[in-house]
């Protein structure tokens, strides 16, 4: 199999990342199928993809003339057989549960052609956790995207039995869709950037959960010293607190430490209140005008991040 043989892409999961990856592939000329469990999920995703396409055109990420052709390349289905037909490469973005990932991959292992490459967009798990249950461990590796609206850096991470040919093909595919691949030699939790980011978020959550400092003060400290436009809690809002909680809760169950459990419990309160970050217009901050975006956020003490 060669890079020219990759023409049709299947996106597993119609959430935020699945939408971005699917739209990116479509803008680069690939036929895209997005699979999820329910038609309502897919219908909502279609609307968000159309809005995202508009934003990408307005921000000059892609020419306006390419928008409609790209959108027309995207089809959606909740039917496994339809989703698997003619697929050359799969990008998986389902919840961070290794058992679930293994099961969904195996369903497509039974239906896809032998040459189909499986990639996972997992943020915190390792491909080896579900490689065997996927049915084709030698053709599975991680192709991890960040927020495509702000960066074109991606991670390519093989596991111990990934075929070198597959790693090379996935790297070439990343380049074909305009991304800059960071290729790891071996598995590492959180890849490169996320490994550092998870340590930052873990530390920030721990300080807030233990009432050491309010969230806005923690962000002010990071932003003021590092000269960034956003702090760890603003970053978590942009990722989605449901995603951050799922990752944190998974590792809390694996590590079984007081710190990890406290962090998960702290996030769960926001989950229960429906405060999931930017996607719900409220998380640690209120949107569309979060406190951290104010010109005086660092220089002046503010009453509360949620004001």
Image (tube, rainbow, N blue to C red):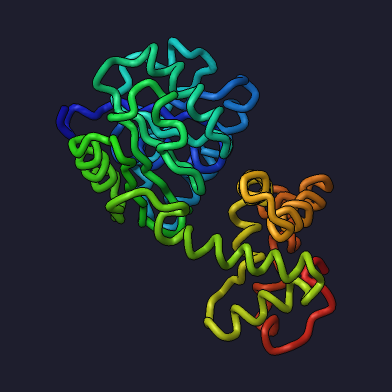
Q: 228 left or right of 61? A: right
Where residue 262 sits, quadrant-wise, is bottom right
Q: 132 left or right of 17? A: left
Q: Which residue extends farthest front?
A: 256
Seen in the picture, residue 21 relative to 109 is either above or below; the reply is below
Q: Please report the residue visible at 65 percent of the width from the left and 73 percent of the height from the top.
A: 293
Q: Nearer the viewer, residue 124 or 173?
A: 124
Seen in the picture, residue 306 relative to 153 is either above or below; the reply is below
Q: Please report the residue visible at 53 percent of the width from the left and 81 percent of the height from the top.
A: 226
Horizontal and vertical percent position of residue 81:
44, 10
Q: Nearer the viewer, residue 215 or 67?
A: 215
Q: Nearer the viewer, residue 285 or 188?
A: 188
Is residue 21 visible in the rendered image? The answer is no
Q: Please report the residue visible at 27 percent of the width from the left and 52 percent of the height from the top.
A: 185
Quadrant where the N terminus sits is top left
Q: Please report the residue visible at 74 percent of the width from the left and 58 percent of the height from the top.
A: 258
Horizontal and vertical percent position of residue 288:
69, 60
Where residue 128 sits, quadrant-wise, is top left
């Amino acid at each position: 199999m060669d890079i020219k043989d990759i023409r049709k892409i299947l996106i597993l999961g119609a959430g935020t990342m699945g939408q971005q990856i699917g739209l990116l592939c479509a803008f680069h000329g690939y036929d895209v199928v997005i699979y999820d469990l329910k038609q309502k999920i897919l219908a909502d995703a279609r609307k968000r993809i159309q809005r995202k396409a508009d934003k990408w055109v307005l921000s000059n990420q892609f020419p306006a003339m390419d928008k409609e052709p790209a959108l027309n390349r995207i089809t959606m289905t909740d039917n496994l057989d339809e989703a698997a037909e003619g697929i050359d490469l799969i990008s998986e973005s389902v919840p961070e549960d290794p058992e679930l990932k293994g099961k969904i991959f195996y369903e497509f292992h039974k239906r896809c052609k032998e040459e189909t490459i499986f990639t996972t967009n997992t943020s915190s798990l390792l491909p080896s956790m579900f490689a065997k249950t996927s049915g084709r461990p030698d053709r599975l590796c991680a192709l991890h995207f960040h927020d495509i609206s702000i960066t074109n850096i991606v991670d390519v991470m093989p596991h111990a039995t990934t075929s070198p040919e597959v790693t090379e093909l996935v790297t070439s595919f990343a380049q074909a869709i305009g991304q800059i691949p960071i290729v790891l030699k071996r598995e590492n939790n959180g890849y490169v950037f996320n490994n550092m980011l998870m340590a930052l978020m873990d530390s920030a959550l721990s300080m807030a959960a233990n009432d050491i400092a309010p969230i806005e003060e923690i962000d002010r400290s990071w932003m003021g010293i590092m000269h960034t436009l956003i702090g760890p809690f603003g970053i978590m809002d942009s990722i989605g607190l449901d995603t951050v909680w799922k990752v944190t809760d998974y590792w809390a169950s694996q590590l079984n430490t007081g710190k990890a459990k406290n962090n998960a419990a702290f996030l769960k309160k926001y989950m229960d209140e429906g405060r999931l970050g930017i996607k719900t217009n409220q998380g640690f901050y209120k949107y569309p005008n979060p406190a951290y975006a104010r010109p005086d956020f660092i220089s002046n003490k503010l009453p509360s991040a949620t004001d």
